[in-house]
Amino acid sequence: MINIAIDGPGGAGKSTIAKAAAKELGYIYVDTGALYRSVGLYALRKDVKTDSADEVVPLLKEITVELKFIDGSQRVFLNGEDVSEEIRTPEASMAASNVSAIQAVRDFLFDLQRDIAKANNCIMDGRDIGTVVLPDAQVKIFLTASAEERAKRRYIQLTEKGQEVNYEDVLKELQERDYQDSHREIAPLKPADDSVIVDTTEINLEQSIDTVVNVIRERI
């Protein structure tokens, strides 16, 4: 199987770009961040501290997370409920960052990610795919952009969904998550040694997709 790993900070366009690249190449797209967001969402619903292993770990036995591919798009199911939209809020994003620093949560989701990759040609995105989940991926890409540009894109995305947010709050939350993800002890956000860095700050979405597809085609 051919596995492509795409890592990078929040708001870099990983999911949109990876999804489009997978469609063009005929691969399955796997958004691993959605798995962590689902665990984070469940913890929020249970009103526990999402950065507390003591409070989060006991919940894992109550959680079933599934990725289903419906009409060509990935949907995320938490205990049978489609939470694909609910996991995209800023609160779920920060909760995902918190729970992803807990080793038991990573172990809980690790096998699911690996099993999908073993069974499919796929493009998998996240924050530790090239470094931890798929260290033998044929192609590794680290997708990034300036914090300001990423916040602008996230702000537009959220307002288009009808959420009331302001740019300054979005930027602050994104910077907090960047720091948290890159400084955590377990599987910190960083480029794999053999990854290709793709900075999309100055290019549009279509150009970003073309760049990523070209990198993949050059290497497989």
Image (tube, rainbow, N blue to C red):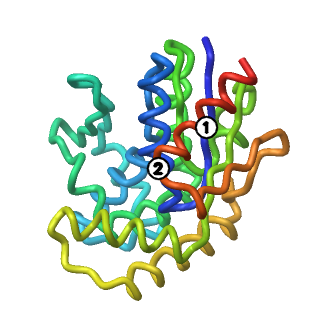
- Residue pointed to by mark 1: 212
In the rendered view, does 17 fall on the left or right side of 187? left
Q: Secondary structure at mark 2?
A: helix
Say the numbered circle drawn on residue 46. none
- Residue pointed to by mark 2: 205
| Residue at x 28%, y 39% (from the top left corner) | 76
- Judging depth in this view, the residue of 27 and 87 nearest the camera is 27
**How far across and down, in percent of the image, does residue 21 sit?**
49, 31
In the rendered view, does 131 fall on the left or right side of 166? right
* Sequence-first tag of 1 and 2: 2
**How far across and down, in percent of the image, does residue 164 sit?**
19, 79
Disc 1 crowd, CA 10 A, few/some/many (<14, 14-19, 20+): many
Q: Which of the image's four quarters has the N terminus?
A: top right
Amino acid at dot 1: Val
**How far across and down, in percent of the image, does residue 98 sit?**
48, 66
| Residue at x 31%, y 68% (from the top left corner) | 156
- Judging depth in this view, the residue of 129 and 138 nearest the camera is 138
Q: How many marks?
A: 2
**How far across and down, in percent of the image, does residue 211 sit?**
62, 39
- Judging depth in this view, the residue of 202 and 124 nearest the camera is 202
Q: Which of the image's four quarters has the C terminus?
A: top right
Q: Quadrant of residue 79?
A: top left
Is disc 1 in contact with disc 2, using a CB cutoff of under 8 Å? no
- Distance between the Cα atoms at labels 1 and 2? 11 Å
In the rendered view, does 137 fall on the left or right side of 210? right
